[in-house]
Amino acid sequence: MRIKLILAVLLISLPSLSGLPSAAEETLKITYLSRIQEPSWAWGSEAGVYVHQNQLYIPLGYPGLAVYDISRPDQPVRLKVLSSFELGGQAGPLAVRENRAYLALPDESAIAVIDVSNPARPAVLTRFTVAQGVQQLQIRGSYLYVQVGSSIQNEGGIFAFDLSKEPPSPAGQYTKDLIDPGFFLTGTGMVFLARTPAYSYDSAKIDCVDMSRPEKPVLKSQWASKYPGNISDIDMNGTRLFCAAYWGGIWVLDASDVTDLRLAARFDWIQPAPYSKSIRAVTPYVFLAQGGPAMSDQKFSEYKMSGDGLRLIQEIPASTYTHSVFRAGELLFLIEQESPWGNSFPQKIIRVYRIESALLPPTQVSLKRQINRSLFFQEAVHTISWRSNPGNEGIAVSSYRVYRKPAGGNDDEYVLRGAVSGSTLSYVDFRLKMSQKFEYVVTAVDGEGLESPFSITVKN
């Protein structure tokens, strides 16, 4: 390996990592920044956190929704807690777009629409009805996609709502029985939805569904595992799906062809062992929240892909029960939740880290817009150009990746538009409608698949 990066993990008030495998040769630096703690219980408290711009949103169930300013992640500032009384129900999963937050109220089978233009003074605007059992929310374009778990009474799946309407109105759905928590939605509206095994010897499955037009969902393919394990969480990095297999470990799928998902790598452990609960990837690295019946099972683990396998790099022990892993850019959030059975006021604990790569993004990124016209058609053409980063001297940059999202969209709406070799310093995006507005970023990738952070954003 050409790069040597020190794994510096500053764990305040946590057990020593001296017994962990040596990781001196690894290429990620993980630095502890801060800790946030809020009381959290009742329906909704099992939801993860959400980051929008410089705000961290923490659903707490009955206590409500906490909002923090993390413009300085080493010194988070509590801005507001909207109580369940103000919300009209217990705070659950949410998603944020521009000045609107959409918050599930699981005890009311509703979603609250909240004005967050002033994060220190959020205000509930309206509420609308959804199915029971909301597990995750995501926004793409003008649609809110709501993932719902199945139950004895109801089928689960994906329910889409048109956000251009007031209040948001149903726009389409893809419903099935046996829905697991695993769910990922790409920037183009492609859904990867985990399906629960139907019986003891059945396998977990993933439905790949095109919901770019929610009124006409199209099943593109279904992948079935050969190994046991419910899929409790899904993340996507580049063209690979990273699946937390609750009973089994980690499964990595090649999703470059959505009509033919294939297993690319896996890491399995022999029972009894901690459960896989939540996963986030920074290719070729994978962060996993692991749990289990014993406190010794509670940990956050970092793995590295190598060929068709993964190897353990380090473990960060949890102080209580692991909950989930969430990533927003260079920030990594490790989330724990105390048991309501052992605490009158159980706490949700969020530890904030910064993850840094030695690989730096390209510089001087620019966009040139041209218009091609003919007798029968016209199109916009965007040429994105950049310079190699001087800080990558001595590192073999194998390729550059260009990502695109609709103008004003969240960072999780970026879609890989294309890739070029490490010796090429431009990319052409063509066949664009004249009215379309986009934002672009570029990343550098080394020979092991490690990807730099995003470059500066350019837009037309």
Image (cartoon, rainbow, N blue to C red):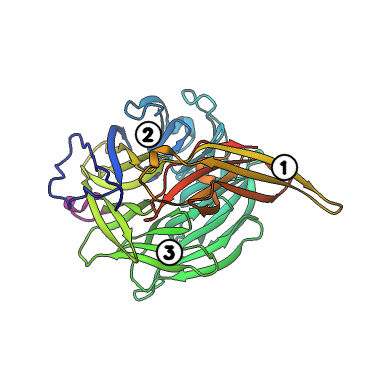
Quadrant of the rendered structure where residue 124 is? top right
Q: Is residue 12 left or right of residue 438?
A: left
Circle 2/circle 1 CB separation < 8 Å: no
Query: In the image, residue 145 lies at what x, y percent?
Result: 55, 50
Which of discs 3 and 2 lies nearer the camera? The answer is: 3
Circle 3/circle 2 CB separation < 8 Å: no
N-terminal of the pair, mark 1 or mark 3, is: 3
Q: CA distance from mark 1 to mark 3?
A: 37 Å
Circle 1/circle 3 CB separation < 8 Å: no
Residue type, numbered disc 1? Gln
N-terminal of the pair, mark 3 or mark 2, is: 2
- Specify whether residue 130 is in view: no
Which of discs 1 and 3 lies nearer the camera? The answer is: 1
Residue drawn 46% across the image and 57% down it: 149
Residue hosting label 1: 370
Count of residue discs: 3
N-terminal of the pair, mark 2 or mark 1, is: 2
Quadrant of the rendered structure where residue 265 is? bottom left
Query: In the image, residue 120 lies at what x, y percent?
Result: 46, 23
Q: Is residue 134 left or right of residue 169?
A: left
Part of the protein shown in magenta: 291-300
Quadrant of the rendered structure where residue 382 is? top right
Residue type, numbered disc 3? Leu
Q: Which secondary structure, mark 2?
A: loop
Q: Is residue 423 left or right of residue 5?
A: right
Residue hosting label 2: 63
- Looking at the picture, does residue 173 appear above or below residue 110? below
| Label at residue 253 | 3
Query: In the image, residue 104 lies at what x, y percent?
Result: 49, 43
